Structure formats: structure tokens, C-alpha cells
Image: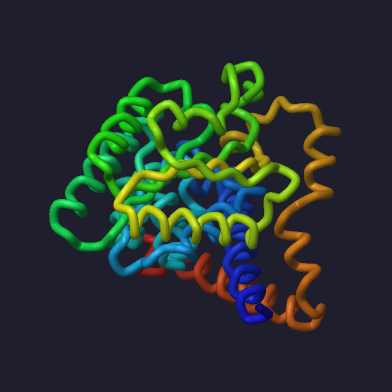
Amino acid sequence: MQNLTETFYRQMQTIRRVEETLLKLFSQGKIRGTVHTCLGQEATAVGVINALDRQRDVIFSNHRAHGHFIAYGDDVAGLIAEVAGKSSGVCGGLGGTQHLHQRNFYTNGIQGGIVPVATGAAAAEKRKGSGAITVVFLGDGTMGEGVVYESFNIAALWNLPILFVVDNNQYAQTTPVIRAQAGRLQDRAVPFGIKTGVVAAEDYDVFSVYQAARRAVTYVRDQSAPYYLLLNSYRLGPHSKGDDHRDESEIARHWQNDPLARLAEQLPPARRQAIDAAIEQRLQTILTAIFAPASPLNAAH
């Protein structure tokens, strides 16, 4: 368990520091466009991705994809360079934050648009008999898109090996979920006969997510059938860049229950400090390589 705690902490802390760094780089004018960070939601990326078979499973993410990408391949340099528009980025600096691709990992920022694509990929894997499953990450705001339910229908009708992961961070941009979604999100897939799992807000941490994801992945792979996993998290950072209009006291209250901070408490202080130091050193080395004027990695696409 201690090794798993260290692994999860290292991954979550890496994601946290990368996201904080990207926001800082944006404020410095070193990156342009949009930056959707997953501060506070790192447990979703780490818990789910570690439950998968990275060698064969297919992953589709959305506009808030940095954490999923790092948990999948740990390519911090490729991500930062991509968001900065450098030719050394994972997609040559052409895709940017919302269009990341590496091996079996894909993202797209169109609201709900990636869901039918992921469903089609699941159909392809089933037809090939690869034993792979497809995973698609959605936000609570995406549950208002009709194409999501069309995908539920096809996935259930054709018994497709796909895991729908809904990361309910409580806000669709600046609109709270209670003002955007009628009914209960945990009931969304029930009419289609899709098995459902839920991690409640009070239970949201990386181990709860990991165990729930392992159960879901096992079911999807063994049954070749869809599964709907609802994770109730909270977005600690802004929707994008600095556009945050939520009540400051509400955000502060959730910072006190930060899943990453709670995980850090499970490690010996000296070990945690060593991991933090290694992450900082790695990050500084990457930033120097990408943004140093004479660096070959600094070339624009």
C-alpha cells in the first residue's frame, strides 16, 4: 500500500504542479489561447488511468485533459511544449491544450463530441477481438448534450466495452450543476440498462476512485458491456485561466478538503519532501529546455 501511495502522490503532485505552472506561464504571456486545469480533480485522472491497461485500452478525454494525459504517459515536457505552441510538443505544437494525442490517448474540446467517437472505437475493439476497452471522460456540463444519450443507447444496444467516466466537478464553466442539470446525474444511464457506480463527494479521493474504476474496468472487460461511473469531485481552480466568479469562501472550504493534501498526509514527511523536490527539479529542467532562447526545443511550430 505504501508503494501505491507514493506512486499516486507522485502522479497527482506532478499534475498539480504542471497545472499551476501552466497558469503562471499564461499570466506571463508565454502561452496563449485557453488553459483548462484540473486542480482538485487529480484523483480522477490517477485513479482511473491506473486501473487501465495502458498498452491496449483506448482513452478519450476532453477539454480538461492535462491530468489524464500525464497520468497516462507522464510526458510533462511534451504537454507543456504543446500548450506553448512549440514544435517539440507532443503534437508538434499544432494541437494545443484541447487536441492532445499519444499512442491510444486522444482528446477533443467539443462539448460531448468525443463521446460518439469513443463509442465507435469501442465497437471497433470489440469487432477486432482485441480485449481492449474504451474509456471516455465527460464533465457534468456535457450531460446536457443529446449525443451523449445516443451513445449510451448504442453502447447498451450493441454491448460495447466502454466505460463512461463522468467527473462532476460541480460547475459547468460558472454555472453550478444544480442550476444546469435536472434530476440526479447518477441516474442518467439507468434507462439504458447500463450498470452504474458512484463515488460520493465525501468519499472522493484517489483510492476510492481507483477501487471504483477497477471494479468498472473488470466489468466492462469481462462482460463486454458499458459501464457508467460518476465521480463527484470539485474544481479548485478556475474554469479556464483566471475566469472564476465563485464565492471565495466556498472555494476556500473545499481547499481545506483537498484530496492531494489528504494523500500527502499519508506519507512520511521526509519522503514527501524528497518526491516534491524531484518533481520541482524535473519541472525546472523542462521549462529551461523549452523556453531558453537558444534551446532547440524553443522553436515554434
What residue is at 54 percent from the left and 60 percent from the top?
46
Q: Position of residue 110 (x, y in %)?
A: 37, 31
What residue is at 74 percent from the left and 82 percent from the top?
271
Q: Position of residue 104 (x, y in %)?
A: 29, 58
In depth, the one of 238 and 112 nearer the eye is 112
Is 234 on the left or on the right of 139, as rendered? right
Q: Which color scheme is applied?
A: rainbow
What residue is at 69 percent from the left and 73 percent from the top?
276
Is 260 on the left or on the right of 165, as rendered? right
Is 184 on the left or on the right of 160, as rendered? right
In which image quadrant can residue 207 be found? Answer: bottom right
In this rendering, does residue 158 appear at all? yes
In this rendering, does residue 300 appear at all? no
Q: Position of residue 119 (x, y in %)?
A: 28, 40
In which image quadrant can residue 1 be found? Answer: bottom right
Up-down relation of residue 100 to residue 167 (above or below): below
